[in-house]
């Protein structure tokens, strides 16, 4: 890793609690590996429930002081953090590529995306306005003020090691909450680097803490059951989301959950086919298919099915699989062996039930966990890919005939995160946009994420929204103040 960095300033073999870097003390450790090479990048201390409790104590002690600072102070500090992230974007991108695998250009994109949330909430911090309500009786005055919920525990996944943390920490800190953050065990180095810069920016000790460890369940339990934590914000699998929500029910703890998706991507026969192929490439193969908003099921209308399949397979053949640090790489490795197993199982199931592979289809032999970007034709209901999120570079193409039929199939899932469709006719565009049971819909685009927009899902894809002015609400309580006798 160090050969890709100008300095080692952003690396620490330590967690960050109450402004202190907590190293191993010779106790238990875990290794962070580069998925492209298997190379060991770092050995980090295993922190568990007791370190988590110490971080919670620190966050709890400093929270009223942090909340009492003028909003403009918090804004200025977040802005400094943002400026430092931008100034160190290349270094942060290299750390991200090393631990997660995505191509360097994509990693840089993620760093800028992560920073955009910090910039946005640095600005938003100053606009947490309350309201006055005309009272129904002459002797009363009614007001609403907004206050931070308190200490927030965040748990985040490996697929966006920087952005998922920024998306939670920025609004939380902006409104006066403090944060205990547990990054994914596969990708903690980006979180550590962000904390180094937060410290440098002057975010006070205890306001932003990083707990490192592989025992997610133990750290999660402490965050859920410690009464000093008032909210959990989680991004990850629906399965773990369910566990956390159940654990939080004991204390009626607030939860924001950004969980799995099973995004439909629909191409109608009046779509601009080249634009639809571009959209599918961006939505399906970004991050090697490892995002919760990746197109998972591609529905193509009968008249354009063969043409779309041919164009997509041609583009997919141009992708270049390799180490994220190599020039020209457009697809990095999958995160680990189990990810390869899942992709192989989904393809094998589809092929055994009649689908054909028209691009890719196999693991890349040699070092690392690489998989060829794949397109499957002749996919139908009843195959695993119709129901489950693949989380890999596989595009299954389903054929459909009518608008009603495709809406029914697209909505036939317990998930409701992102959906995409390409169409020309405006009347159809509105009809389909309104009928899709998803929190986010991309129309004639495969890229929808933005700090200015509310990101989040419905059904079993989650609760709450991240980004936009709405994203601050997840970290605020409304307090109604009624003044009598006036
Ligand atoms: P993924 O499939 O993306 O790894 P997970 O939901 O398993 O998704 O993991 C997301 C995050 O949740 C990681 O930081 C992981 O360590 C953490 N985690 C896993 N299991 C639990 C749990 N039982 N309680 C709390 N956190 C957990």
Image (cartoon, rainbow, N blue to C red):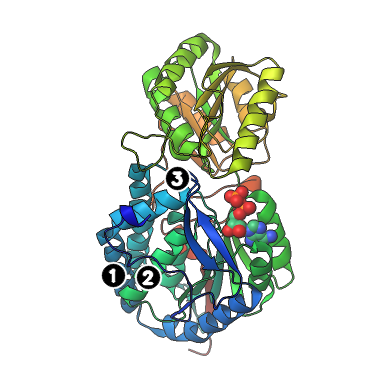
- x and y percentages locating residue 414 in the rendered image: 68, 40
Ligand 1 near label 3 (Cβ, under 8 Å)? Answer: no
Mark 3 and mark 1: Cα distance apart in space: 28 Å
Task: Indicate which disc residue 198 carries.
Answer: none
Residue plotted at (65% across, 74% down): 49
* First of labels 1, 2 by sequence position: 1
Quadrant containing the N terminus is bottom left
Regarding residue 92, the answer to whether it shows in the image is yes
Of labels 2 and 3, the one closer to you: 3
Residue plotted at (52% across, 83% down): 58
Q: Which residue is mark 1?
A: 80
- x and y percentages locating residue 91 in the rendered image: 31, 57
Q: Which residue is mark 3?
A: 101
Under circle 3, the secondary element is: loop
Q: Are the residues flagged by discs 3 and 1 in contact, CB closer than 8 Å?
A: no
Q: Are the residues flagged by discs 2 and 3 in contact, CB closer than 8 Å?
A: no
Task: Indicate which disc residue 196 carries.
Answer: 2
Under circle 1, the secondary element is: helix
Q: Is residue 429 above or below residue 24?
A: above
- x and y percentages locating residue 13 in the rendered image: 46, 69
* First of labels 3, 1 by sequence position: 1
Q: Residues within 10 Å of mark 3 (few under 14, many from 20)?
A: many
Residue plotted at (37% across, 24% down): 275
Mark 1 and mark 2: Cα distance apart in space: 13 Å
Left or right: residue 176 versus residue 234 is: left
Left or right: residue 78 versus residue 349 is: left
Q: Is residue 122 above or below residue 302?
A: below
Ligand 1 quadrant in view: bottom right
């Amino acid at each position: 890793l160090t050969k890709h960095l100008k300095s080692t300033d952003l690396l620490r073999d330590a967690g960050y609690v109450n402004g202190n870097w907590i190293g191993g003390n010779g106790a238990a450790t875990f290794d962070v590996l580069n998925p492209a090479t298997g190379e060991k990048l770092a050995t980090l201390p295993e922190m568990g429930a007791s370190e988590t409790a110490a971080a919670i104590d620190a966050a709890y002690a400093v929270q009223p002081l942090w909340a009492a600072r003028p909003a403009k102070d918090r804004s200025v500090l977040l802005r400094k953090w943002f400026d430092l992230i931008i100034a160190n974007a290349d270094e942060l991108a290299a750390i991200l590529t090393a631990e997660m695998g995505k191509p360097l250009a994509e990693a840089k994109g993620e760093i800028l995306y992560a920073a955009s949330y910090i910039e946005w909430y640095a600005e938003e911090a100053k606009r947490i306005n309350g309201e006055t309500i005309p009272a129904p009786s002459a002797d009363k005055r009614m007001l609403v003020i907004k206050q931070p919920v308190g200490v927030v525990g965040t748990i985040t996944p490996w697929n966006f090691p920087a952005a998922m943390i920024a998306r939670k920490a920025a609004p939380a800190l902006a409104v006066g909450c403090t944060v205990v953050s547990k990054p994914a065990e596969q990708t903690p180095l980006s979180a550590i680097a962000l904390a180094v810069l937060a410290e440098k920016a002057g975010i006070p000790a205890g306001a932003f803490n990083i707990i490192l460890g592989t025992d997610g369940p133990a750290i999660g339990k402490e965050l859920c059951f410690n009464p000093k934590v008032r909210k959990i914000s989680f991004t990850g699998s629906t399965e773990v989301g369910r566990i956390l929500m159940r654990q939080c029910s004991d204390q009626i703890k607030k939860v924001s959950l950004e969980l799995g998706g099973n995004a439909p991507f629909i191409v109608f026969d009046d779509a601009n086919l080249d634009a639809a192929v571009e959209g599918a490439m961006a939505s399906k193969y970004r991050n090697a298919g490892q995002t919760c908003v990746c197109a998972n099921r591609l529905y193509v209308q009968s008249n354009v099915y063969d043409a779309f399949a041919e164009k997509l397979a041609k583009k997919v053949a141009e992708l270049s699989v390799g180490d994220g640090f190599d020039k020209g790489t457009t697809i990095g490795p999958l995160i680990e062996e189990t990810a390869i197993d899942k992709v192989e199982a989904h393809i094998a199931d589809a092929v055994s039930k009649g689908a054909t592979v028209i691009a890719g289809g196999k693991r890349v032999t040699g070092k690392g966990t690489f998989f060829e970007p794949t397109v499957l034709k002749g996919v139908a209901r009843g195959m695993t890919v119709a129901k489950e999120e693949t989380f890999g570079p596989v595009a299954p193409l389903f054929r459909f005939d009518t608008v009603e039929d495709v809406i029914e199939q697209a909505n036939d899932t317990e998930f409701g995160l992102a959906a995409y469709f390409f169409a020309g006719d405006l009347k159809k565009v509105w009809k389909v946009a309104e009928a899709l049971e998803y929190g986010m819909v991309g129309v004639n685009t495969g890229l929808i994420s933005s700090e200015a927009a509310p990101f989040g899902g419905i059904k079993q894809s989650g609760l709450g929204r991240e980004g936009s002015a709405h994203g601050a609400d997840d970290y605020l309580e409304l307090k109604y103040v009624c003044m009598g006798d006036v």
